Image (cartoon, grey):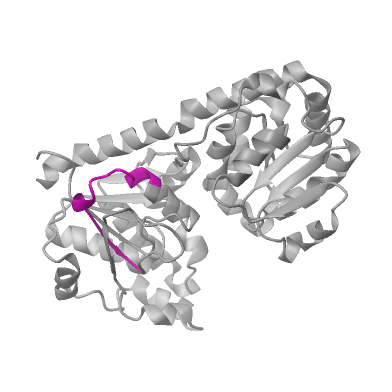
Amino acid sequence: MTGPANLLIISDEGPQTGTAGALLLHRLLSGYPPERLRVLADDVPTVGRPLPGVQYRRISPPWRRFERSRYNRLMRSLRAFNLVPHVADREFGRLLEGFRPDIVLCVMQHKAYYEEAHRFARSRGLPLVVVVHDINEEFEPVLPWAAAASRRRDAEFYGFAALRLCISPEMEAFCEKAYGARGTVLYPNRAEDLAPRAPEESRALRGPPALTLGFAGNLNYGYGEGILQMLPAVRAAGARVIIYGREPNGAAAPLRDATDCCEFRGFAERGEQWTSFKRECDAVWQPYPNPAGTMERLYRYHFPSKLPEYLALGMPLIVTGPDYATGLAWARRNLGPDLCASSAAELGAVLAGLASSGEKRVALARLCHEAGERDFNPAHIVKTFRGLLAGLAPAAA
């Protein structure tokens, strides 16, 4: 085979820039020859940019509408016993329009779609690549009598895959234990155009005498609660937090009243928050709630895509939360105790240390950027991904 393999993506979300998981796919495949790609997904992108020149076609597994109804658990439970119809071969033929795939790629998200990818690849003798960002059974629970059967079907799917790309070492270990096969760790890839500020710019506080922290992103998934829990330490240190994101709601709603130490900037246009942080902040912050409650399993295995972006800014990164959270575990291994905290008291010490020494801020800024480049360099991640695909291409030729 000459050139990249013909890659067919069958997924609930195709590569696009509007949602976090789809954005990671978009970054991995940016620059891939568009004539070598075909995307079959739940919908053609409407909330973000698709890959230019790539053909997207809508695929809808039978009975999919029931999964958005009150019968959703029953529907998924029936699927665990293969009692739900599948996409017909003639429908695949119509959607492919003569495209001849060499490799099938899917995300292990929404079983209705990744099972179709599995069936298609198996029926045509093609290698299957699976990307694992989350534990899908957390988001698609079945009725108790179907749990074991659903896990067995996931194990069959995962074991069939020729390449299993897990978002963290913890996720890879979980999948090996749950599904009986080893995977490959591929950390989330950040945008390539993020440029760091010089470490020396961390020497002087940006808004003296206060230490200024930055947070960007979704306040759901417990991150707003994580900030809320740590506000006593932030206030005691005389620090302030700039927050880019949608207005806090739910359990994080009380954050709206913390205007004495939090400044809310709303949703940012692309890249605006990073420019602002480099200009106005002394450190960036990845907060988890502690205890994590219903989010514990998510935090144990998922890896926050925001963390590689923070590290690319050339600033100290503070990570707070329970020690089992993957982001904090990575930070403890790579950044050390000066930037990690599992309690308000520990965060107080971290903030005091950063506020008191420009030399320390410069050293930690340099450490964070170097660690980020080592594990999350986007060019290296894309090269690794493309190399793994190329390794499957001879079998597909």
- Is 32 a magenta residue? yes
- Is 240 a magenta residue? no
Q: Nearer the viewer, residue 365 or 10?
A: 365
Residue 9 appears left or right of 142: left
Question: In the rendered image, is residue 321 in sight?
Answer: no
Question: In the rendered image, is residue 40 in sight?
Answer: yes
Q: Residue furthest top?
A: 359
Give the answer, above or below, for where 316 lies relative to 71.
Answer: above
Residue 13 appears left or right of 341: left
Q: For residue 2, which quarter of the picture?
A: top left
Q: Which residues are magenta?
A: 27-42
- Tell me what residue is drawn at x 16 percent, y 72 percent: 94
Image quadrant in which the C terminus is located = top left
Residue 8 appears left or right of 375: left
Q: For residue 28, which quarter of the picture?
A: top left
The picture places residue 63, in percent across and down from the top left corner, at 35, 81
Give the answer, above or below, for where 180 lies relative to 76.
Answer: above
Q: Nearer the viewer, residue 97 or 292?
A: 97
The picture places residue 328, in percent across and down from the top left corner, at 63, 37
Q: Nearer the viewer, residue 185 or 179?
A: 185
The picture places residue 241, in percent across and down from the top left corner, at 77, 44
Image quadrant in which the N terminus is located = top left
- Tell me what residue is drawn at x 57 percent, y 46 percent: 300
- Tell me what residue is drawn at x 88 percent, y 42 percent: 235
